[in-house]
Image (cartoon, rainbow, N blue to C red):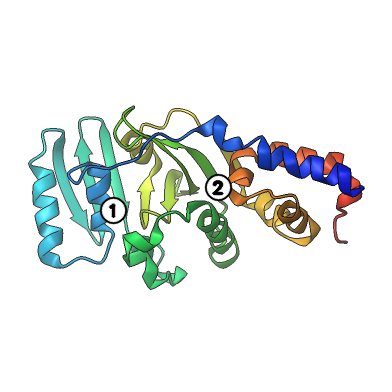
Amino acid sequence: MDDENKEKVKSKYVNQNYDLLFEEKNFYIPKNSLAKRIQDLTSNISDEVRNAILEELQSDSFVDEIRENNGVISIKTTFGEIKFSEIGTFFPDLQVEEILKDKNKRKGDCHFQSILYSKALKERLRIENDVVTANIYPLADENNYLHSWNEFEKNEEKFVFDYTWNVVMNQEGYYALNHISKIISRISCVEIAKDMTGNIAKHMEALGITLKTYVTCRNEVMRDLEKNRDIFEEER
């Protein structure tokens, strides 16, 4: 492909701006929201603060019961049960980084980390998983933001692995908590392993295709690369 045509392909992704398809509203989680308090519970806090958060949650009108067993917290609410634990509690062999304890350091990196942990879950723990992307609404329709996480199954139950929240949560509870009704993209760990190796990843970078664009529009990105085989060939 000559430089002129290559620039046209690059321009499509840079100037078409896929963000417009998934425009984010102003995002703010009030201090007392359930999503905010779950993120606090999976951060580096004292036992005193932890007990105070659980006590505060128990007094909420939408909470029926809270139970904790071996690091797994179950919150029965009026919209269903939410079961969650820290990533390191659910996967003690994963050897997660200390950064997961600091919720402020986890922000703004969900697309990259979901891809990174997709590989770790598959290669180190032999767990098939998908990278899932959608707009999530922790406070119904008042605000939303584009977010990526991992999903897997264990003992016929579906779970969400969310790096940003440092949490493994039952899928049903996660979807209810974040009012998720439509998935934008679902990419298997097998597809990611193929896409992120060899010349494909190199040419995505050369064409200005960001990870945010990849996780939201992976199928279209791959179709465009297939149409332009002269700019990439699979390494054999």
Residue found at x 11% / y 38%: 60
Q: In this view, does 192 lie above or below 25?
A: below
Q: In this view, does 155 lie above or below 185?
A: below
Residue found at x 56% / y 47%: 130
Residue 6: image x %, image y %? 84, 46
Name the amino acid type tagged 2: Val
**Nearer the observer, 156 or 84:** 84
Residue found at x 53% / y 43%: 132
113 left or right, relative to 220: left
Name the amino acid type tagged 1: Gln
183 left or right, relative to 5: left
**Nearer the observer, 69 or 31:** 31
Residue 122: image x %, image y %? 58, 60
- Mark whose residue sits in front, 2 or 1: 1
Label 2 CA crowd tier, 10 Å (few <14, some 14–19, many 20+): many
Q: Find residue 27 and report its image quarter.
A: top left
Tag 2–tag 1 contact (CB < 8 Å): no
Image quarter where the C terminus lies is bottom right
Label 1 CA crowd tier, 10 Å (few <14, some 14–19, many 20+): some
Residue 82: image x %, image y %? 28, 42
95 left or right, relative to 30: right
Q: How many labels does the image show?
A: 2
Provide the residue designation for mark 2.
Answer: 131
Q: How far apart are marks 2 and 1 (CA)?
A: 20 Å
Q: Which mark is residue 39?
A: 1
Name the secondary structure under disc 2.
Answer: strand
Residue 180: image x %, image y %? 41, 32
Q: In this view, does 45 lie above or below 141?
A: below
225 left or right, relative to 175: right
